Amino acid sequence: MAGTIDTSKGLPSHPERATLEAKNKFLGFWFFLGGETILFATFFGTFLSLRNGTADGPASQDLFHLDLVFIMTMLLLTSSLTSVLAMFAMKKNNFKSLIGWMIVTVLLGLGFLGLEIYEFYVYVNHEGLGFSTSAFASSFYSLVGLHGAHVTFGIAWIVVLLFRYAKTGITLTNAPKFYLFSLYWHFIDVVWVFIFTVVYLLGVGGGTHG
């Protein structure tokens, strides 16, 4: 059949883009990430416009602790590295290593989410920063929460893939799916670097109360 890939001698060097369907998925995914970039840019713009509108609530310099945020950042950046190692394993047709590195990626992502939930809990219950406390609070929870929702989706995505293909090995069908997850994970890691810089680093420098 035209377009069929012969795998009798093993997978090609780039199984994630070896078929026409995989190439189409790859192209479509870049359009999807373009839309996600615009979405996050909108939320970043909103936050920058409202970050000084603290009303009678606490300001960023009263809340943020960079030691906790640094740990969160290291967890997420390390998870990006483990997803890269998983892709290296896939290209070497080492399914066991692929699964192992993906599991580590999931655990690191869960660690990040756990700390983010703890951070929100402290802000709401101990610092008095509810979602509607101020314009700053609403824009902060919206931006950081949106990113957290993307992390949650990414974890659910890879867990589904791991369960679905736990016994199939690496194929031309699942290789593009693992690869697209890796791209998505890198994207949300990059977004977090911007959040760390724009929200937290600038936030600890303080601002005028609005």
Image: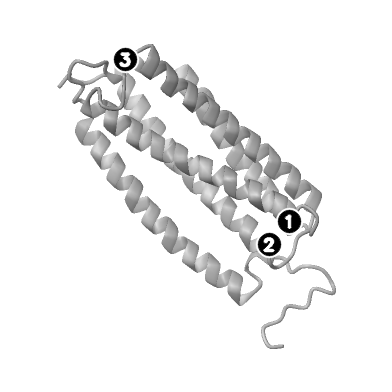
Q: Residue at x 19, y 15 (%)?
A: 56
Q: Is residue 164 left or right of residue 35?
A: right
Please identify the quadrant where the C terminus is shown.
Answer: top left
Residue at the location (63% across, 62% down)? Answer: 176
On-image quarter of the N terminus: bottom right
Residue 95: where, in percent of width, then height? Answer: 78, 53
Which numbered tag is attached to residue 128?
3
Q: How many marks?
A: 3
For marks 1 and 2 on the same chain, the one whose residue lies earlier in the sequence = 1
1 in relation to 77, above or below? below
Q: In 3D space, how far apart are the residues under numbered discs 1 and 3 (Cα atoms)? A: 45 Å
Residue 77's image quarter? top right
Q: Are marks 1 and 2 in contact (CB under 8 Å)?
A: yes
Which label sits on residue 165?
1
Say if mark 1 contacts mark 3, CB within 8 Å: no
Q: Amino acid at mark 1?
A: Tyr
As helix, strand or loop, the secondary structure at mark 1 comes to: loop
Q: Is residue 75 above or below residue 13?
A: above
Q: Residues within 10 Å of mark 1 (few under 14, many from 20)?
A: few
Q: Which x, y percent locates residue 50?
A: 21, 32
Sequence order check, earlier mark of 1 and 3 = 3
Quadrant of res 104: top right
Give the residue number, with chain letter if any, for mark 2.
Answer: 174
